[in-house]
Amino acid sequence: MLEFRIMRSSSPLRRLALAVLTSTLAACGGSGDPAPAAPDATYRVRGELVRFTDAGRREVFIRHEAIPDFRSEAGAVVGMEAMTMPFPLASGVSTEGLAAGDRVEFVFEVRWRASSEPMAITSLEKLPAGTRLGFDPPPSEEPIDATEPAAAPTTDATSTEPLQSVEPSSQ
Ligand SMILES: [Cu+2]
């Protein structure tokens, strides 16, 4: 709330000046990595790599798990349900060894006031094969509960006898 009020109270002129300064600095980045503005938020999420959307593999569709702490641009925790969506990859993020169908863990940053795409993946790593994710169906539901409604205890004496072993006893 405090942040919000400060943002609103800063004059449009000041914000414009800041924007110009920021873009000037970015343009003057030269040989080094242009230092992007600090992200508004960073999330570490797991998901399944559905496919790369371009030949250069700089954007990827990921079916991600729910992100309960996802914040809106206004800063409210709105959460994000599990879904499949595209994520651009920040420069320098390697896709080596990754293929469609891989389970992955990734970090993405959000910059709501970015001039173009507000989200970018800054880390993308393969999870061990067979890693279960939140949207997977439950593990094979062994019909433990379904088969036998608990039988009433029987008073039949024979049922308490251990079964005769077919094998001769070794002792
Ligand atoms: Cu999403």
Image (spheres, rainbow, N blue to C red):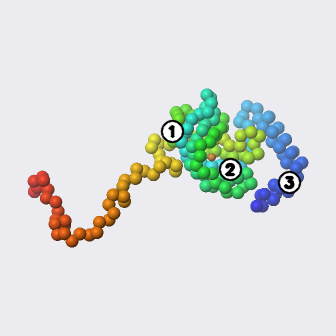
Report the mark closest to the observer, 2 or 1. Answer: 1
Q: Amino acid at mark 1?
A: Asp
At a point 86% along the width and 45% down the height, the residue shown is: 16
Where residue 38 sits: x, y (%)? Answer: 72, 46
Res 48 → quadrant? top right
What residue is disc 3 on?
A: 10
Say which mark, if any, is on residue 123.
none
Report the mark closest to the observer, 3 or 1. Answer: 1
- Verify CB contact (< 8 Å) between mark 3 and mark 1: no
At a point 60% along the width and 51% down the height, the residue shown is: 81
| Mark 3–mark 1 distance (CA, rounded to whole Å) | 45 Å
What residue is disc 2 on?
A: 41
At a point 78% along the width and 57% down the height, the residue shown is: 4
Residue 16 is left or right of residue 103, and the answer is right
Quarter holding the C terminus is bottom left
Please state which of residues 32 and 103 is positioned toward the viewer in this rendering.
103
Residue 143 is left or right of residue 54, and the answer is left
Q: Earlier in the sequence, mark 2 or mark 1?
A: 2
What residue is disc 1 on?
A: 102
Helix, strand or loop status at disc 3: loop
Q: Examine the rendering and report whether any part of residue 22 can be seen.
A: yes
| Mark 3–mark 2 distance (CA, rounded to whole Å) | 21 Å
